[in-house]
Image (cartoon, grey):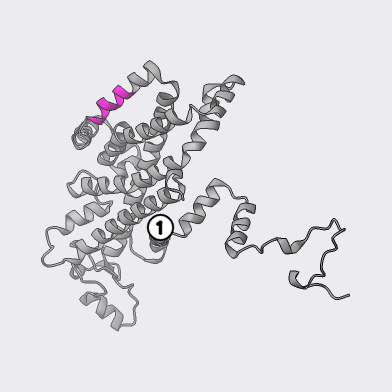
Amino acid sequence: MDKVKNIDEMPKKSPLSLQIDLKKFEKATEEEKKQQDVMSESVSFFRDGMRKLMRNPLAVGSIIVLLLIVAMILIVPHVVPYSYSQIISVNGKRDKTASNMAPFQYSDKEQAYIAEGGKVFPHIMGTDEMGRDYFVRVVYGTRVSLTVGVFAAIIVLIIGVLYGSISGYFGGKTDLIMMRIVDIIYSLPDMLMVVLLSVVLREVLNVDQFPVLQKIGTNMISLFIVFGLLYWTGMARLVRGQILTIKQNEYVLAAKVSGAKSGRIIRKHILPNCISVIIISAALQIPSAIFTESFLSFIGLGVQAPMPSLGSLANAARAGISVYPYKLIFPSLLICLITLAFNLLGDGLRDAFDPRLRR
């Protein structure tokens, strides 16, 4: 017997039969079929958020730009044969004619060396006033600025989450006292604190005993201290507000009744439910820290010479902006790219993970 391919082709139902008459049912529309597929699919909160993030073209473009920048600062130092403090030399002798060269330009000595059959790696972004390869300095400056931004965001994340969690969970007088401390810290001028700490640390701290600290300099140490002292207040307020709302839920009360300790309740039940807000705030904190470091380096309070940063490179290029404008364009362009990429990524994370913006 041939199989029935359509409901209309089925034989007429007998009046005495208990079989269901399929002709009384309507066919499912395409929209109802899609709804059934979505309802039957089980995805986690993180996977659902990442799927929404990947549908955002600006966020995806920002991720690609940041990955390219990270790949550049990791690969270029191993490919380009110059260091950030190395003065250009030909056959082991310093080339005094290699200063302030335009991009992809060779000095007279380099051209003569090439004519003799030698090989010289091109100066992609030219050289600076001391005859150092500018491309390598920009790459190292980008590495310093990104490191400062990520490290500062980690400091803000740890201190802000811990402080805001304690304040929001315990509430009452504890919350009142802790928030008044936040208000006092929030009123302190951050730039003035950086300047004062730089002066004090330069006199008190002996960085010569620590090679790593000597390379970073007292200005950057003071900047990290200021981030640890002042910049976590916004994160603390945000986490506190989230926890004040979440701790009223029934599953938190059930955890208290079951005898769970406060630390476990915060760690296992409360923080996971506000992790999206924490991730978004941390992503937006990185460009803020990068911009702050670039500004401080621009006014001479950033990394210590000869270690470059994007702000210090822009400051050094200020003197010859009318003659060598490219020296200011390259670091400024990277600052704009990094800041814009992180801001767009933060907006994309907010749209993907914030439950209030979900449709």
Residue 215 screen position, x and y as percent: 31, 45
Q: How many marks?
A: 1
| 102 versus 335 height, above or below | below
Q: Which residue is drawn at 46% across and 60% down?
A: 55
Q: Residue furthest top?
A: 173
**Residue 103 placed where, x, y %?**
24, 72
Provide the residue designation for mark 1.
Answer: 59
Left or right of residue 266, residue 300 in this image? left
Amino acid type of the residue tagged 1 in the rendering: Ala
**326 left or right of 220 in image:** left
Q: Is mark 1 on a helix, strand or loop?
A: helix
Q: In which quarter of the image is the N terminus?
A: bottom right
Q: Give the range drawn in magenta.
A: 179-187
Magenta stretch: dominant secondary structure: helix
Q: Residue at x 40, y 57 (%)?
A: 59
In the image, residue 42 sits, relative to residue 65, either above or below, namely above
> Residue 111, how many percent across, how many down?
25, 79
Q: Position of residue 20 (x, y in %)?
A: 79, 58
In the displayed structure, 249 sits above or below 214; it is above
The answer to whether any part of residue 74 appears in the image is no
Q: Place residue 74 in its image quadrant.
A: bottom left
| Along the line of sight, the residue nearer the viewer: 216 or 310 | 310
**Rendered view: 345 above or below 207:** below
Q: Nearer the viewer, residue 297 or 245?
A: 245
* 350 part of magenta stretch: no
Within 10 Å of the Cα at label 1, are there few (<14), some (14-19), or many (20+) other Cα atoms?
many
Q: Nearer the viewer, residue 288 or 93?
A: 288
Q: Would residue 340 be seen by someone viewing this image from the given angle?
A: yes
